[in-house]
Image: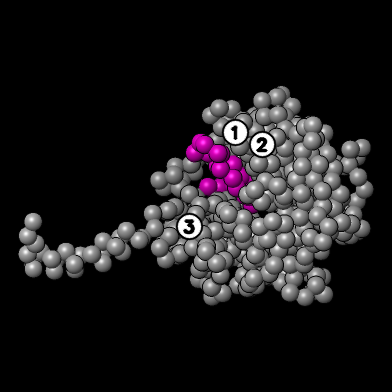
């Protein structure tokens, strides 16, 4: 076959454009939803995955203080807690139109306690769990095959419960039991809740199909005064990290199950401070965790200090070595997350009412410390659609 000089030059000229198109990432989410601390409800923003920019931030679904969101594992349904500080809080469900990130409210049910701050579903989509911070309780809801909520099938209340323990030593923050997360174990057999008020991790066996999906929990003591807040399993499933709100620390628990009973063990020597200077602990609070898909990098933020740290994870032990520390460029960073490509890191800054977006190298974990900043009203959660 003979190729003319003109054809060769035309093909050569087109080659860089073809290679550039081949190298461009697969189009990702077009939208994010923002949980908020206002009665204006859930906000929507357009997301540009190529530039890491937000636009057209606007409220799209009225709801009282929808501070934490989660998606059904298989259905186009969004669940949002209504973090009402007085009286009973609520759990709301919305049908999600993924093309437009529009929401249509379906239900709103009481969570049986005030200040619900966390919602999750089991991996099968048959149960939802809500941590009531002010109410010191964990609520379990059964879910129908279409994702509909049923009234709370179980409510584990710590106050006055013999299965619970004594309050922690911090008289201001540990004046009562305070549940702060509801994390389902990788095997879908347990849900783990941090009890900040009593310095404990409560581990509930779950049965999503049962009329009462919760059993009495196994209690694992944390360090006195630490105030456990959030749990994150390592991708290998052999250990989990716990970030403590009151003393700004992270530690590791080895995850074991024997004869159906969870037996996590605190790893000796694993405790690290999230603060640049531990003496700055008064006024600062540990907050959120995130981990890379391969488990090699862990990220944590601390409010007050307004810092976000990247840690290198030892692949054998899970121990953490600080790699980078930046400022979140906002006040009271309630939540942070990555876009699906992990090229961008987003912080929801509750105290300064803005979102900050940082460029991130997923291979090395390096974060560009200079973000783009977008004002919005009391952002508290970020969900990519």
Query: x, y (%) of residue 148?
Result: 58, 31
Asked whether 107 or 164 is in front, the reply is 164
What segment is highlighted magenta in the picture? 61-84
Image x and y of residue 151, in percent: 68, 30
SS at circle 2: loop
**Pointer 2 with pointer 1, Cβ within 8 A:** yes
Image quadrant in which you'd find residue 46: bottom left
Dot 3: what SS?
loop
What residue is rendered at 45% in x and 64% in y? Answer: 52
Q: Estimate the spatial distance between the alpha carbons at disc 2 and disc 3, rounded to whole Å.
A: 26 Å
Q: Choose the circle earlier in sequence order: 2 or 3.
A: 2
Tag shown at residue 124: 1
In this rendering, position of residue 111 left or right of residue 336: right
Give the residue number, with chain letter if any, for mark 3.
341
User: Relative to residue 374, is residue 76 depicted above or below?
Assistant: above
- Dots 3, 1 in contact, CB < 8 A: no
């Amino acid at each position: 076959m003979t190729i003319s000089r003109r054809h060769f030059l035309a093909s050569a000229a087109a080659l860089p454009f073809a290679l550039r198109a081949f190298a461009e990432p697969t189009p990702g989410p077009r939208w994010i939803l923002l949980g908020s601390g206002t009665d204006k409800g859930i906000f929507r923003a357009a997301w540009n995955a190529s530039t890491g920019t937000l636009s057209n931030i606007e409220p799209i679904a009225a709801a009282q203080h929808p501070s934490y969101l989660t998606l059904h594992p298989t259905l186009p349904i969004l669940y949002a807690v209504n973090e009402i500080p007085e009286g009973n809080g609520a759990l709301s469900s919305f049908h999600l139109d993924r093309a437009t990130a529009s929401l249509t409210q379906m239900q709103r049910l009481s969570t049986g306690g005030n200040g619900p701050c966390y919602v999750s579903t089991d991996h099968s989509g048959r149960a939802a769990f809500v941590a009531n911070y002010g109410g010191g309780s964990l609520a379990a809801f059964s879910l129908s095959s279409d994702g509909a909520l049923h009234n709370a099938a179980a409510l584990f209340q710590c106050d006055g419960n013999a299965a619970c323990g004594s309050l922690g030593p911090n008289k201001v923050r540990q004046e009562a039991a305070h549940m702060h997360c509801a994390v389902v174990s990788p095997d879908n057999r347990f849900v783990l809740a941090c009890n900040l008020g009593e310095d404990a991790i409560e581990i509930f066996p779950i049965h999503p199909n049962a009329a009462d999906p919760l059993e009495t929990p196994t209690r694992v003591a944390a360090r006195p005064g630490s105030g456990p807040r959030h749990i994150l399993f390592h991708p290998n499933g052999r250990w989990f990290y716990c970030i403590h709100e009151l003393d700004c620390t992270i530690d590791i628990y080895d995850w074991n199950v024997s004869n159906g009973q969870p037996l996590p063990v605190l790893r000796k020597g694993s405790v690290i401070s999230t603060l640049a200077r531990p003496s700055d602990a008064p006024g600062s609070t540990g907050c959120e965790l995130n981990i890379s898909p391969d488990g090699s990098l862990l990220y944590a933020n601390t409010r007050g200090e307004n810092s976000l740290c990247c840690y290198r994870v030892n692949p054998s032990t899970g121990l953490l070595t600080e790699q980078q520390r930046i400022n979140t460029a906002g006040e009271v960073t309630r939540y942070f997350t990555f876009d699906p490509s992990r090229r961008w890191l987003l912080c929801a800054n509750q105290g300064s009412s803005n979102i900050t977006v940082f460029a991130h190298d997923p291979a090395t974990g390096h974060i560009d410390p200079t973000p783009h900043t977008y004002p919005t009203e009391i952002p508290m959660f970020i969900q990519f659609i």
